[in-house]
Every structure is written in structure tokens, then in C-alpha cells.
Image: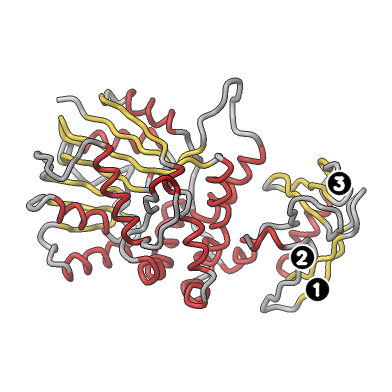
Amino acid sequence: SRPRRLFARVSTRFPRETMQTRVSIPRAPAVTLRVGAQHERILRQQAARTVKSASSSPAAFSITTRRGPVVCRASSSSPGPMRSLFNLEDIAKPFISAKDTLNEGIASFYDESSGLWEDVWGEHMHHGYYPGGQPRDDHVQAQVDMIERSLEWAGLEATASGVDRILDVGCGIGGSSRHMARRWPGCITRGITLSPVQARRANELAREQGLENRSTFQVADALNQPFDDSGFDLVWSMESGEHMPDKGKFVNELARVCAPGGRILIVTWCHRILREGEKTLPEDELQLLDRICEGYYLPRWCSVAEYARLCADEGLVDVRTADWSEQVSPFWRAVIRTALTWRGFVGLLRAGPATVRGGLVMPLMHQGLKRGTIRFNLITATKPR
């Protein structure tokens, strides 16, 4: 990806005056970065920190900042992995307004970015399904296939009876809800999102598609849902669990609103299951996830094993999990390719700085899936009668 082809000698143009900051690191060539004045203080703080470690290559090193070790590489003829004094996505950070809470950050991010996603990718704001991990060009159909395959895996065939009320938790602009409303004629779907822009657009699309009486959407917190107990036959969460700061409370709310005999289906990003003897992920994997968290307003990650335990703790039965990381592996390459088109590039800039930062983080999602740190998991369970 393009970030890997960058060297530590970086020239970036900012709206304010620019200046040169020279950073000298023991056992490594001097690194000169041309940065905006607003980044000078950050770079000077980084340079003042102690060199924590050095690789076998004298041109590689790391420094410790408040955000953790940052690995760097000077331009050199010696081969070696890409290093950068600051993360590429940080270019957008000075232009992103700070938010008081995680929920405000999530809502603002989707308020800003959802229009671009719909313009380029359509109404489904989630991964596509790619059998065997093989690329395909019909990405919109791949996203529809993800919905269908997930439902079928959970034992919810199109002919299944008893699916009369569906709740879509983290509904985006309502693509899954409207698809399921058409799949089960007569069923009622409700969707909740933190984003007012998404809720408004979801209701507009429902009216345009003649589903306004069966599919409705509103702003609500998934951890404090405005619904009575036991109100839905299917509680569906397609790629929203990663935004939940309290995974236990999240599963608790899904179980609360699910009717006895009803099914819960969670499709979400997780980190890999810890290996024997590991108490946490290694530092390099944690740093990768931290950068993704900042770009997409995510709290801490968990593994699918933790989700399964939380479901069992809630008294849910028939708990099953699956790993579809291979089946989604081509997705981020496709998204990155669209972002690198003129239409995608201009769209990112017009959407806003948080969307630009999200775009710059996309290669990290591809990297995390490829190395196995990130897993794409499904969890389903039944609420006992």
C-alpha cells in the first residue's frame, strides 16, 4: 500500500507556515521532516524521548511517545520494513474537532462519512462475502450475500416462520433492515443508530422503496435501547459491536429485547483468540488496533471467545461462533482501490477530515486481517423460552 512506500524524509504541505525540525537518533542517520508548525511541538517531544529499542539494522529505531513506541526508518539503501516518525493518518488529526464522549465521536464520524459511502458503495455499510476469499467485481451483491449467508448460517432461512419483528442494532442507513423486510413479507423492522444523518437517510430510503410502514429508524444508544423487554424475534447486529465500549452491557441489551425463543445474530470485528500463555496481545498488535480505534472511534477490542462467554453468562443457549476472515479478505483491497480513484479521492476531501483519516486507516484493516490480528466473526444464540 502507499503508506509502506513512504520514507522518513516526508514533505507535507499544511495551510500554516512550515518549518524544519531535525531529529537525531543514536545509531541512526539524522531524519529531517518538513512539517506544519502545529506539529512542531509533537515532534520535539518525540525526539526528546528515550530511544527504546533498535533493530538489527542501524537505520531502524523506535522512540517512546505518550501513545506508545513509534518505529522509524531513515532513508537508506539497506533493505528493511517501512518506518515512519508519525502515523500517516495523523495528518488529518489537527483538523478534526474533539468530542466529549465516544458516542459523540461515532455519531459525528457517520454523520460526515455516510453520504460518501452510499454514493460509492450503496446502502449496505458492511463487508461483502467473497467465497473462498476470491475477488469478485460485484461488490454490492457481495454485501447482499453477506446478509443472506449470515442469516442462513444462523438457521434463519427465507422460509423460516416466526420472524415477525426484527431489530437492527447499529443500522447504518438501513440496508439490512429493508432487505430483511423484503425477505420476510409482513415482518416489521426497527433500526437504531447514533447518527441523526443515518437515521434520516434510512427513513428516506424506506419511503422511496415503499417500506415506510414496515421499516422505521431512529437515533438511540445500543447500550440503553428504548424498547420493551422481549419485543423482537430477531435481534441483528451487523458490524456495530466493535463500537460498543461495554461488550457485556451490549449482549445484555440484545438479550433483554429478544423474545423467548428468538435469535440473536452478531457479525463483528474481533481480535484473534489469545494463544496459550498469552495474557494480552503483543505490543505491535495492540498498536495496530489502537491506530484503527482512533481512526474509526472504537473502544477496546475483544475476541469471539469473549462474546461466546458473555452470551452464556446471559443464559442464552445454542451459542455458536464462526470465523469468516477468509471470506471477507478481498473487501478492504476493493475499498482502497475505490478511494484511490479520482471520484473517491475528491469524495474523501469533500466529506471532511475525520473521513480522510478513516480512509488513511483502511490499509491497516487490510494489514490486520492479513496478519491474523483482526478476525471477522459471527456469533449467534437463542433466548430460551
Is residue 200 shown left or right of residue 361? left
Residue 57 marker: 3
Location of residue 260 in the rendering, given as x and y in whole percent from the top left corner = 15, 30
Q: Nearer the viewer, residue 314 or 335?
A: 335
Q: Secondary structure at mark 3?
A: loop
Q: Which residue is mark 1?
A: 19
Q: Is residue 14 above or below residue 324?
A: below
Quadrant where the N terminus lies? bottom right
Please say if the residues under marks 1 and 2 sit with CB atoms less than 8 Å apart: yes
Of circles 2 and 3, which is in front? 3
Amino acid of disc 2: Glu
Q: Residue at x 38, y 34 (%)?
A: 322
Q: CA distance from mark 2 to mark 3?
A: 27 Å
Q: Nearer the viewer, residue 142 or 313?
A: 142
Location of residue 304 in the rendering, given as x and y in whole percent from the top left corner = 43, 33
Decide which of tag 1 and tag 3 comes sooner along the chain.
1
Q: Is residue 312 above or below residue 181?
A: above
Q: Looking at this view, name the residue that lies furthest to the left.
A: 186
> Quadrant location of residue 110?
bottom left
